[in-house]
Image (tube, rainbow, N blue to C red):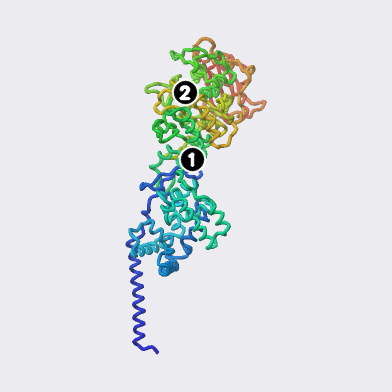
Amino acid sequence: MLSRKILRRIAWSTGAFAALLAISAIALWQFDRIYPPPLDSQSATSAEVLDRDGQLLRAFATPDGYWRLATSLDKVDRNFVDMLVAYEDKRFWNHPGIDLLAIGRAALQLVTNGRIVSGGSTLSMQLARLIEPRDSRSVASKVKQVLRALQIERRLTKREILERYLTLAPYGGNLEGVRAASLAYFGKEPARLTVSESALLVALPQLPEKRRPDRNALIAQAARDRVLQRMVSAGRLSEREAARAAVDPVPDLRRPLPALAAHAAYSALKRIEPGKPLQLTVKKSVQAGLEAVARDAAKRLGPKLSVAMVMADSRTGEILGEVGSADFFNAGRSGWIDMTRVLRSPGSTLKPFIYGLAFEQGMVAQETMIEDSPADFGGYRPKNFDMGYQGDVTIRQALQLSLNVPAVRVLDGVGPARLLARFRQAGVNPTLPINEAPGLAIGLGGVGISLRDLVQLYTGLANGGKVHALRDGTEATPVDNTAATILDDQAAWQIADILRGVKPPQGALPRGIAYKTGTSYGYRDAWSVGFDGRYVLGVWVGCADASAVPGLSGYVSAAPILFEGFVRSGLPAMPLPSRPAGVFSPKREELPVTLVRFGPASDGRSVAGPSEPAPRIVFPPDGARVDLAPATAQATPLVLKLQGGRAPFRWLANGRPLAGVDRTRTATWLPDGAGYSTLTVIDAAGRAASVKVFVE
């Protein structure tokens, strides 16, 4: 039986031990409270710009000069993660931050071998060292690291610990984190790594500088092979798998990280929040293709010329690719200037919308004749690009050949103010010269407009006349995506049908697009804008300082880039819009008398020449709601009335001519159904007036 003295000693020892534990627990609690791990102040990650699918377009080095990309465990190859845990910390998922078995094994190996054979650090301890680098390898530093690991485990889940480790682990040079390393050494994200690639990435953080594959390929290969053998010993790989992986060469160079969409990325850099990548509407494959086209074209064109491109989805307004210049860092081309947003003269690229308004108002048909000859419009005397004249041509030929005088004749008929109003309705505000009212020079480029705005207008031609505001994801405020009307669907189809017949540039691959070119006054800007049934691509070529370039033209300089851009964008070819119901497109011999010729011939006057006032529909008024009985034999037709104009008059309902030609200013119309209808009257001088009514 134990004596009282022994029992007292046991009791005292037990109490002392309990007291020591309590004091230690209190000390640890105080340490944890007073000195929390600096998790919130961990090193900043690189700002990232992603494409519409989440692929990396461009990253920016951190303020301290590192490529440090935030890493999510879901986007890292699972086999790599398993290999990392098996190699570095096989009881990671179970221990509280320190692995006593591993520490004991390391201590025993140190005693028996006289040197460190394997470390006892867990991934949690390594993370503690990464977020709070130690000054020395002293015992005190190691103890602090252990305490930090315990603190980290209390605050983060195992998954979060792994993600932070994979973000901060060193991989040589200024590469930190598995994503930066995978992109630099393998040219891909770490979502799908081979066995060989995984083994190399596991081996690098232990001695990142010594094992850098781009500088010490043999040392890196030996380290990778040791990881492979360890995986065989751990039962994670078979001998055959390890042997196959060991045959793969290690990369001997460091690739640059993705660097696409420079102008969009830099413009949004200030708004990118740490750890929250900015996602653009751009598609990476489209962006890469367009940048390659612009770069190659600029080399062919000359050392000072630059190329800008914008490709958009006409159905949504989303920009799929945008190139502000051929080379962002090229000082000779002023590459840092985003030429997609700079106001320049659009040349002839606005002509389709002039003719579109004429089609919409029933003033012309594709086979309507118009005169291309010298003309004086109140002192304004436009000339064609080649200084020659074609005489009588059809509206179709006039637009396809981009003749200047016919375009001005038609603009004089539809009115420059109406054209600008329609642009503004579609969300585009061209800039006029200071203190000048809208004039006929608009039709030949006498206005300032950006490439982005021009592409926005052309999306209406590919989308049945409906325009969505362009956006790329860099906007500081949300963009109103409500569709606006640039032309009605029938007029938009007429223009697309004409432009699809424009001859492609020499050597261009067939694509099935409709397109228009333009050259500004003085050979300063060359343009080409084209579209298929969904996608619109605009191209600008010129000097950023607006200097003249002899020989520069839309057809020769920009159109080949347009066709190549469509091909190398990788987007599927979409058929052009189909003919809408009710489109009036007669042959020449079927034209009504008022559509045979636009305006008076051979007198050099504009369409506004007749002394009579232009026709104006006085009944029904524009926007009226008309209550009629169903279209039966007993239904009462609606009486149409107009004022002004020169007889005879031709009436059209929804683009279809009504029977007969009226010499009086009244006519009748029997609607064929409920809904919106457009009524148009054209006089003998080719002037037109239109109203929209709703039939109930």
> Which residue lies under the disc numbered 2?
552
* 576 to 37, vertically: above or below: above
> Which is more toward the observer, 315 or 654?
315
Element class at badge 2:
loop
Which residue is outermost to the right?
Answer: 633
Residue 95 coordinates in the image, percent (x, y): 45, 65
- In this view, the mark in front (2 or 1): 2
Looking at the image, residue 101 sits to the left or right of residue 630; the answer is left
- Name the foreground residue: 156 vs 149: 149
Report the amino acid beneath label 2: Leu
Outermost residue, bottom direction?
1
Viewer-proximal residue, 101 or 602? 101
Q: Residue at x 63, y 28 (%)?
A: 672
Kindly tell me whether residue 46 is visible in this rendering: yes
Question: Is 196 or 38 nearer to us in this picture?
Answer: 196
Q: Point out residue 581 in the picture as x, y percentages from the top left corner.
A: 62, 29
**In the image, residue 275 lies at what x, y percent?**
42, 49
- The residue located at (40%, 24%) in the rendering is 547
**Callout 2 crowding tier (Cα within 10 Å): few <14, some 14–19, many ≥20:** many
Q: Quadrant where the C terminus lies?
A: top right
Tag of residue 281: 1
Categorize mark 1 by other alpha carbons within 10 Å: few (<14), some (14-19), many (20+).
Answer: many
Amino acid tagged 1: Thr
Tell me residue 336's x, y (percent). Answer: 40, 34
Q: Is residue 315 left or right of residue 105?
A: right
How far apart are labels 2 and 1 at the CA level?
Answer: 32 Å
- Mark carried by residue 57: none
239 in relation to 518, above or below:
below
**Mark nearer the N terminus (2 vs 1):** 1
